[in-house]
Image (cartoon, rainbow, N blue to C red):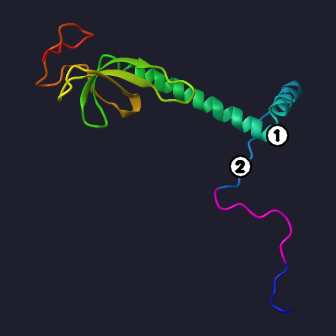
Amino acid sequence: MRGKKPKKVGRPSFSNGKAKSIVLQARVRPSERAAYVNEAKTKGVDLSTWVRETLNRSIMVNAMQQNDKLASKLVGQFCRTSAGDRVFVESVGASSAGLPARAVVRRIEGPNTGSRAGCFVSDLTPLGYETPINEPRRKSKHVPDFEE
């Protein structure tokens, strides 16, 4: 039978972007490497997977901490929600377990003016600390004055 190619032996190749092609090297003490290998075995994964997962988890924790710092700066500011409503940020809860930070806001315009709501911090665009134009002045620094 001419023209037929023999079957390839071995594992099929990865599609583009799936294969890990970068090798990361680090110098560690023999005792450190032994601890890493032991921890990887405890988790039931190989050393490469354990190192990658540990580093990626560290990156996620650092990113969440940075987001929490930025979110806490929104307290006391006027913001616009992704729906276009203007709100006053009363408090912000820290993110946890991979969930984004949430804010408690008070609506300052529209049919529900003065009502409280919760939203994701990522849905807020800061407008600043000053009372927006055409809005009632605040009596105190922390709680806006809303009378209907």
Image coords of residue 55 (percent x, y):
68, 33
Q: Which residues are magenta?
A: 7-17
* Viewer-side residue, 55 vs 106: 106
Q: Secondary structure at mark 2?
A: loop
At 78% across and 40% down in the image, what residue appears?
48
Q: Quadrant of residue 28?
A: top right
- Specify the quadrant of the image occupied by residue 127: top left
Say left or right for 15 vs 66: right
Gap between marks 1 and 2 measured at Cα: 17 Å
Looking at this view, is 72 or 33 the one in front?
72
Report which quarter residue 25 is drawn in.
top right
Question: Horizontal and vertical percent for residue 85?
Answer: 24, 32
Rate crowding at label 1 as few (under 14), some (14 to 19) or many (20 or more) other CA atoms within 10 Å.
some
Horizontal side of residue 86 vs 41, given as left or right: left
Q: Residues within 10 Å of mark 2 (few under 14, many from 20)?
A: few
Task: Give the position of the C terminus as an image quadrant.
Answer: top left
Residue under the image location 55 percent in, 30 percent down = 98
Percent from the top left, x then y, of residue 145? 18, 13
**In magenta stretch: residue 14:** yes
The answer to which of 32 and 98 lies nearer the viewer is: 98
Q: Amino acid at mark 2?
A: Ile
On-image quarter of the N terminus: bottom right
**Vertical arrangement, residue 62 with respect to residue 148, above or below:** below
Residue at the disc numbered 1: 46
Vertical relation: 87 (above or below) 15 = above
N-term-proximal mark, 1 vs 2: 2
Specify the farthest residue to the bottom.
Answer: 2
Q: Residue furthest left?
A: 134
Q: Nearer the viewer, mark 1 or mark 2?
A: 1
Q: Is residue 1 magenta?
A: no
Judged by its main secondary structure, the magenta piece is loop
- Residue to which mark 2 is pinned: 22
